[in-house]
Image: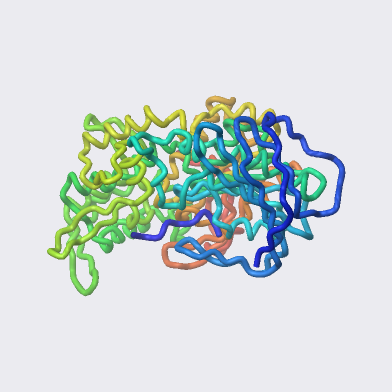
Amino acid sequence: MKRILTVLAVSVPLAAVAVYAPIGASAYTGSSASAPFTCSSIKVHAPAGTKVESVTPVSQAAGTVTVPGELGGSVPDVPAYCDVTVVLTHPGDGDHAKVRVWLPATGWNGRFQALGGSAYAAGDNGLGMAAAVKQGYAAATTDAGVGEARDTSWALNSRGQVNTALLENFADRSQHETAVVGKEVVDEVYGKAASYSYFNGCSTGGRQGYMAAQRHPDDFDGILATAPAINWDEFEVATLWPQVVMNEEHTYPTTCEFKAFNEAALKACDKLDGAKDGLIEAPERCTYDPRRLIGTKVECDDAEETITAADAAVVRKIWDGPRTSSGKKLWYGLPIGADFAYLADTDTDDNGNVKGAPFVVPAAWVSTFVKKQPSFDTSTLTYRQFAQVFMQSQAEYGEVIGTDDPDLSAFRKAGGKLLTWHGQADQLIPTQGTVDYRKRVEREMGGSNRVDDFYRLFLAPGTAHCGLTGKADGLGALTTWVEQGKAPETLTATLTNAYGQTLTRDLCRYPLVSRYNGHGDVAAAGSYRCAASRG
């Protein structure tokens, strides 16, 4: 099983803490007074509908924060901080959701930052928290009472029914409560409220950011929501489409063959931006027909393979995206140029038989949440069954976790700013789903110019899922927008093209696209300008 891409990147127990009765979530406004930093006797009022089970503050020494496991890593030179764990429950639901707040002992920049999760993990594993503290933020995240990135064991109760309380936590509830609790802990520890509050997340975290803008418009001044897993009820099913196609067509192209199709598409569409730079600027405008590759010889592992009409048909359908048997388009396909290896993966048994190997996240969604049969083999879905599952997912979960409400008027009225980037070669979440949402917001709220006042989208050519994390200062652009009123016209990023070369590019705000000036280094941002799309 391939590694899930991440969203990013001696304790001493102290005195007992106080737990207070519930108050309305909007009642807490923070104090204006300032007091000495403290990491003991933290008072936390329960957000509406919850009960505080425990509050545990721990002083953490400066040093390296190390997180073990598949999605682990380390962050060096993290300053000393106060680590506060608040456990919430919703009476009658039997849940236990942890909210963790890390607050630098010195050098606090006056800002609060909440961090989102990845796949089925509702929150950060500690790496993002450590990085935020290192940058001077007071940071917060939640586990929502669920599990790690691949864990869906919480989804069904003992009767085989969906655990609606935990799903609500994962979808929305716990993230809002983290904002409420986190801000209060900041006030308690520093003796004053944060000057600005931000949300930062990619993938599942990006979805959580959009959910905050849609349902809790006062939670954050600024939201950085990247490669967002919005339209969850649709795209999760849609990303099983490559498996359905291979299964129904009885054709499983090899890794080398898939690579050949992407290389041919790059050759055909590289110069859409006016320069041969190893990037497809706008995959949705690439009209390369995979049938042009039929009969081509491909060298793979010292063997020669020939591209067949069946191979080309599979690739064409994967790029086109899921449709019903009558041809109605259901969702967007894998972007041209994106890696096939995740969504069109295969396994070979001891007898040499090839079978599809569905990516774990959409497979778990369909088998556990939609079919309610964790052992269900999604690689066996037919075209007809796929369409049924797609519509069932929409019907059952659109209102719960779809995160696709285009009415952001309350967020705009609250003065919030939403900044998003999405890779044009995202191999896990079709980029055009995010573009589709942005278009619907424009239709709902008066056009592109009005929406740009509070919500800006940047598309990154040749960039994989969450692939700009650490390669573009989205958070810096967002804080400048929120605190100085300077909206970003471009987002400077470091990109890697199809040949492994490093390029700099000023990503254009949607709907503008990058155009080569006709002279200058094709790897340098200064050689391009932002212009209107040619359709």
Q: Quadrant of the N terminus?
A: bottom left
Question: Does the rendering let one see residue 115?
Answer: yes
Percent position of residue 308, x then y: 17, 55
Percent position of residue 280, x then y: 43, 53
Percent position of residue 286, x then y: 38, 47
Of residues 72 and 260, the one drawn nearer to the viewer in this rendering: 72
Farthest-out residue, left: 351
Of residues 298 and 82, the one drawn nearer to the viewer in this rendering: 82
* Residue drawn at 58 percent across, 47 percent down: 98
* Residue drawn at 38 percent across, 48 percent down: 361
Residue 171 vs 344, above or below: the answer is: above
Farthest-out residue, front: 16
* Residue drawn at 62 percent across, 32 percent down: 216
Percent position of residue 291, x then y: 22, 50
* Residue drawn at 54 percent across, 56 percent down: 125
Q: Quadrant of the C terminus?
A: top left
Residue 155 vs 71, above or below: the answer is: above
Question: Does the rendering let one see residue 489?
Answer: no
Of residues 104 and 202, the one drawn nearer to the viewer in this rendering: 104
Q: Is residue 109 left or right of residue 182?
A: right
